[in-house]
Image (cartoon, grey):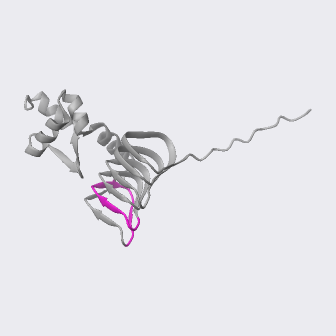
């Protein structure tokens, strides 16, 4: 009797090396080794390893598992496992992570919250993504133009946070203003 040949199935490593300008909200649901070397503006959610290369410029919020930054990032970061800033990294934004390493020559301008509970990290990532809105998102949500949203934010009518040149808003705060009739 001849034995069956067994096929050896190997898990192929998914690697994506991006050296381009990208805008939008990008979500990777499966683990990937992602490296950004160009410009990115928007929100990025990834599983696996994310590297922001030395020449990269990222404006927007990032949620990931293991993140290494060598370039410039303006936005908030949730690193579910680890965040590492290597020279000449420049990070302007708040971070939430379970493990943080900042090498000599790397800069962080923001607040840091260390998270120790895996369930808390997962909940934060989902809540922050679900509630984060750009000015364009708010404009579509309210049926108004983006300039009006920016004007309201500048005037303090809308509570928001400036990420470089763009605004970030909390969806629940916007919905509360609408519900209470304070946006007209």
Q: Position of residue 106 (x, y in %)?
A: 35, 67
**Image quarter hosting the C terminus:** top left
Left or right: 176, with 114 as reference point: left
**Is residue 84 placed above or below 43 in the rendered structure?**
below
Left or right: 180, with 12 as reference point: left
Left or right: 156, with 26 as reference point: left
Is 82 magenta? The answer is no
Magenta range: 86-104
Q: Position of residue 54 (x, y in %)?
A: 42, 61
Q: How many marks?
A: 0
**Is residue 100 placed above or below 59 in the rendered structure?**
below
The residue positioned 27% from the left and 38% from the top of the image is: 131
Q: Position of residue 27 (x, y in %)?
A: 42, 39
Which one is in front, 169 or 79? 169
**Is residue 181 placed above or below 54 in the rendered structure?**
above
Q: Position of residue 125 (x, y in %)?
A: 35, 44
């Amino acid at each position: 009797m001849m034995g069956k040949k067994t096929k050896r199935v190997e898990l192929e490593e998914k690697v994506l090396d991006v050296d381009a300008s990208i805008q939008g909200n990008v979500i990777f649901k499966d683990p990937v080794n992602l490296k950004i070397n160009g410009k990115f503006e928007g929100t990025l959610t990834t599983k696996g390893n994310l590297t922001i290369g030395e020449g990269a410029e990222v404006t927007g919020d990032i949620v990931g598992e293991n993140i290494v930054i060598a370039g410039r990032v303006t936005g908030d970061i949730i690193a579910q496992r680890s965040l590492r800033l290597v020279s000449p990294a420049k990070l302007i934004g708040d971070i939430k992570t379970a493990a943080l390493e900042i090498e000599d020559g790397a800069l962080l301008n923001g607040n840091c919250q260390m998270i120790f509970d895996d369930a808390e990290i997962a909940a934060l990532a989902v809540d922050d993504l679900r509630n984060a809105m750009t000015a364009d998102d708010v404009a579509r949500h309210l049926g108004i133009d983006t300039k009006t949203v920016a004007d309201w934010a500048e005037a303090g009518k809308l509570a928001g946070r400036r990420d470089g040149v763009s605004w970030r808003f909390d969806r629940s705060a916007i919905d509360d203003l609408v519900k209470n009739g304070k946006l007209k």
